[in-house]
Image (cartoon, coloured by chain):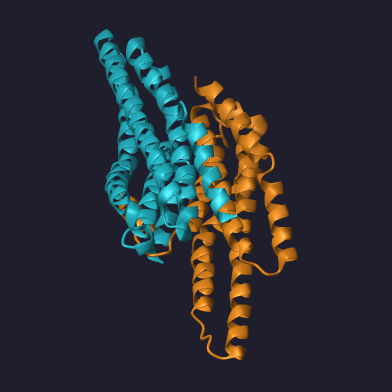
Chain colours: A cyan, B orange
Amino acid sequence: MAEIETIQNFLDGLASSAPTPGGGGAAAISGAMGAALVAMVCNLTIGKKKYVEVEGELKEILGKSEALRAELTGMIADDVTAFNAVMSAYGLPKETDAQKAARAEAIQAALKTATDVPLACCRACRAVIDLAETVAQKGNLNVISDAGVAVLSAYAGLRSAALNVYINAKGLDDRSFAQERLTALETLLGEAGARNEAVYEVVKAKVN
Amino acid sequence: MAEIETIQNFLDGLASSAPTPGGGGAAAISGAMGAALVAMVCNLTIGKKKYVEVEGELKEILGKSEALRAELTGMIADDVTAFNAVMSAYGLPKETDAQKAARAEAIQAALKTATDVPLACCRACRAVIDLAETVAQKGNLNVISDAGVAVLSAYAGLRSAALNVYINAKGLDDRSFAQERLTALETLLGEAGARNEAVYEVVKAKVN
């Protein structure tokens, strides 16, 4: 499989001392794997006689999960861009007072983006968890474990991205901006852990 | 980034109605991302003056995490092979009694492998969790969030692979083989959840 070779390349980059790709990219991939597995269960349920009653609902979920997957895949690159912008801002000259002020402003602007990018990842992962829950309840029993893996991946992605929100929000001078993001994050994390466990138990009961 | 394009290809395969790659491959990738991020934190700690006291320990962890990453990456293909062997066995002819007996035997042999492959993934992910814990405690503070993402990824990989152990063990006629694997699995899952939370809290405290 050619894909495995290039996944290997990505993992080599992750393991290396290069700062990107890092945890932010891994978070986006976890979320995207979750979305892809929701889609897989939908694709293996839609069109099956036994599941005709849930077909309409799963078609809708398939559309949403594929949109979330595209969004999350895009975030792998967004994370690199946001990180590089922060690094570039720190690298600006700081000899004169004017330079210092411009540098500080650039750092703050870059940190705001670097807070919003992982927060968007959290939001998308939270949405994947909700889709995985329905799919775990109604999807084709033969592939129900994939719904379980979907929720676990999305939940890991959510919490992983949350760590990057915390770090970058910490450096923000604009505390009301930071607080708004941290409040939104707590709402997203809110019942996610309980939902993750509930879906896992539904799936575990079906595979045992 | 060329890597993203091919990760996209892998995710397309995951989302499609093709049975592989599926949750087993996603579990192995989660574990491998965890191992890669442990290695990244080691690589960004080793050689730094401030961390000279932990350098020996982190060099050892780097070696172990890279070995686990290679093992976990190999499991993406192992999962496909094991799944295909089960499918091939089910496809064997079953007209004569001799054919039925040969088919049943082949199915059981394939299910045994399909139980042991995800169990090996669980074992490797559990080992990554332990390495992530040390790295979260002693690694370079600037990249400590990556240790948090490492533990979350590895824990998701462990529980994801566990679902595949359950499914395949369920179909085994050899109950003592199955029970032995399920007991080993419970040991691996044992304190993993508590360790995952403990490491996450260590990291969260450092990034807040």
Q: Residue at x 29, y 17 (%)?
A: A103
Q: Quadrant of the C terminus of chain A?
A: bottom right
Residue B188 visible: yes
Specify whether B193 is left or right of A169.
right
Specify whether B176 is left or right of B157.
right
Where residue A107 sits, quadrant-wise, is: top left
In the rendered image, residue A185, in percent from the top left (x then y), is placed at 40, 24
Q: Residue at x 55, y 41 (%)?
A: B38
Q: Is residue B139 above or below residue A97?
A: below
Name the foreground residue: B46 vs B198. Answer: B198
In the rendered image, residue B147, in percent from the top left (x then y), is placed at 54, 35
Where residue A207 sits, quadrant-wise, is: bottom right
Q: How many marks?
A: 0
Q: Is residue B145 above or below residue A63?
A: above
Q: Is residue A199 above or below residue B208?
A: below
Q: Residue at x 64, y 43 (%)?
A: B61
Q: Residue furthest top?
A: A97
Residue A93 visible: no
Specify whether B182 is left or right of A76.
right
In the rendered image, residue B76, in percent from the top left (x then y), is placed at 49, 60
In the rendered image, residue B43, in percent from the top left (x then y), is placed at 53, 40
Q: Quadrant of the N terminus of chain A?
A: bottom left
